[in-house]
Image (cartoon, rainbow, N blue to C red):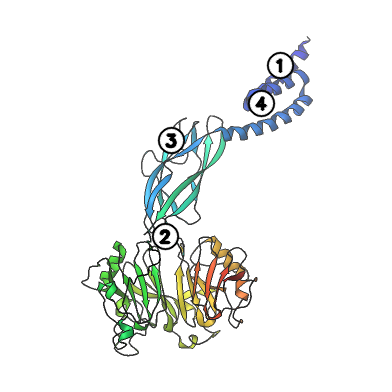
Amino acid sequence: MKDGIGVGVVRRCAWGLRVGAALRGVRALALAAAACIHGAKAMRRWGMLALALAALGMAASAHAQAVTLGNASFPLTQVGQSATQVVTLTFSDDSSLTALPQIDSAHGEFALLPPANPGGCAVNAAIAAGGSCTLSITFTPKLPGWASAPLPIARSAAMLIAFYDTDKSLAGSATLALTGTGTGPVAVLTPGLISDIVGNDTAVENPASPYGGDRGPAGGAIFNAPSAIAVDGFGNIYIADTQNEIVRVVYKSGAVLANLIALENPGTTAVAGDIYTIAGISPKLNPYQNFGGGYDGYLASTVGVNWPQGVAVDAAGNVYISDTYDGSVRMINATTGIINTVAGTFNSMCFAAFNSSCYGDQGPAASAGFAKAEGITIDGYGNLYIADSGNGTIRVVYQGGTALASLIATENSGVTAQAGYIYTIAGGVGNTGGTGDGGLATSAGLYLPNQATADSQGNIYIADTGDNLVRRVDAVTGNIGKLRE
């Protein structure tokens, strides 16, 4: 062999081996052989093939890295409460996290806490093959919306792990599952039997005394046309005692409600099975005493509510009231007992019928006007659904959730939902009642709707009272249809 040829071969071989070393394995040998034997042109042809194979090999190597998650299933947890536990990430190769794990939780019920100990997972910290690090995660189950069966309700979330595999010099990722179950009181039904659990018929027998029994056993309470109830995760029963113009609660358990009862009833300790007033003043001393509009910032039991026809409670224990004839929805803070208006204004011009100057849609809820706000519900995100009965509409005060944001955009010509703003999601002022099935809900007609609620997928169910219908708004399409007649 001539010296010139020998030098060229050596140079080609050396170059091929250097590139091949970066790729490793069979592809490296193929690339080096091509360089030694066939020269630069073949090197380019073989090199392109080798690089393509290398890319495939890199992807395969990334998938070969095993990341496992330990202690990822949370125990039964009471709705509205939190459970925190430490989960473990274990890596099969020498690795390091390139970012903190991201949790995709549809209901916002799983949350990652900052590392709290030396073994906590930290970005760029080296983890040896077979080694692990820990994450602290909280699980806070929320109310699932209006339910026709008792809890429990299963929840899950995906956790995305981004890492760098030091052994293979590759970036990789893994998606791992977190699971948990929210639980609440279990309902017990005796087939064929119905029993009174709250109140008696004294108001019917003696209309002159339609109130009584507070701070005593609920079975002895006297009501005057109760028109709405809500039940929280502890089994406490909230009642809108409409014509007594108060909101009452039958206490079962829970420290938050026990504290609220004590605030609204000084000197009282909540007893399971007893009933207490938590908003409004009773008995009424004159027809005007309980007008509540404008009297915000006080203990709820020291100001009036005017003909309340709706009540709801959120996961934190805050109580919402339809102050119907005051044209507003108000909230009792569970911690302080203070009542404030969260939607609507005390404006008598809005009560009887639609008034465009005070309807206030697509703006701050506190500036909106209602023509008889009646039934209300709260979903797991804290969104407040309101049956604006006199206006023939269903409206919502938005707080969060992509499904509802999408529905609001569909029903309101692409508007972007903002927290604290109010939007119409069904019905339209002046639309003929009972019409519009198969089209957008805001093009349909509702007649004196009394209640609306959402399921876990975001579909809306409406009591279209004046039309003797129950109707459903599809969360995806925004179309409305009859559920049953």
Instruction: Identify residue type, mark 3.
Output: Ser
> Residue visible at 37% across and 61% down?
188
**Marks 4 and 3: CB-CB under 8 Å?**
no
Element type at marker 4?
A: helix
Q: How far from the left and from the top, in percent, is residue 412?
A: 60, 71
**Marks 3 and 1: CB-CB under 8 Å?**
no
Q: From this view, report whether residue 175 is shown above or below residue 59.
A: below
Q: How many marks?
A: 4
Q: CA distance from mark 2 to mark 1?
A: 79 Å
Q: How far from the left and from the top, in percent, is residue 253?
A: 30, 62
Residue highlighted by disc 4: 19
Residue at the outermost front position: 192
**Marks 1 and 4: CB-CB under 8 Å?**
no
Q: Is residue 299 visible?
A: no
Left or right of residue 441, residue 105 in this image? left
Residue highlighted by disc 1: 10
Q: Residues within 10 Å of mark 2 (few under 14, many from 20)?
A: few
Q: CA distance from mark 4 to mark 3?
A: 34 Å
Left or right of residue 459, residue 29 in this image? right
Residue highlighted by disc 2: 150
In the image shown, does 274 or 386 lie closer to the viewer?
274
Q: CA distance from mark 3 to mark 1?
A: 46 Å
Residue highlighted by disc 3: 132
Instruction: Identify residue type, mark 4.
Output: Val
User: Mark 4, mark 3: which one is toward the viewer?
Assistant: 3
Q: Residues within 10 Å of mark 4 (few under 14, many from 20)?
A: some
Instruction: Identify residue type, mark 1.
Output: Val
Give the mark, 4 or 3, whose residue is nearer the N terminus.
4
Instruction: Identify residue type, mark 2.
Output: Pro
Give the mark, 1 or 4, whose residue is nearer the N terminus.
1
Q: Is residue 474 visible?
A: yes
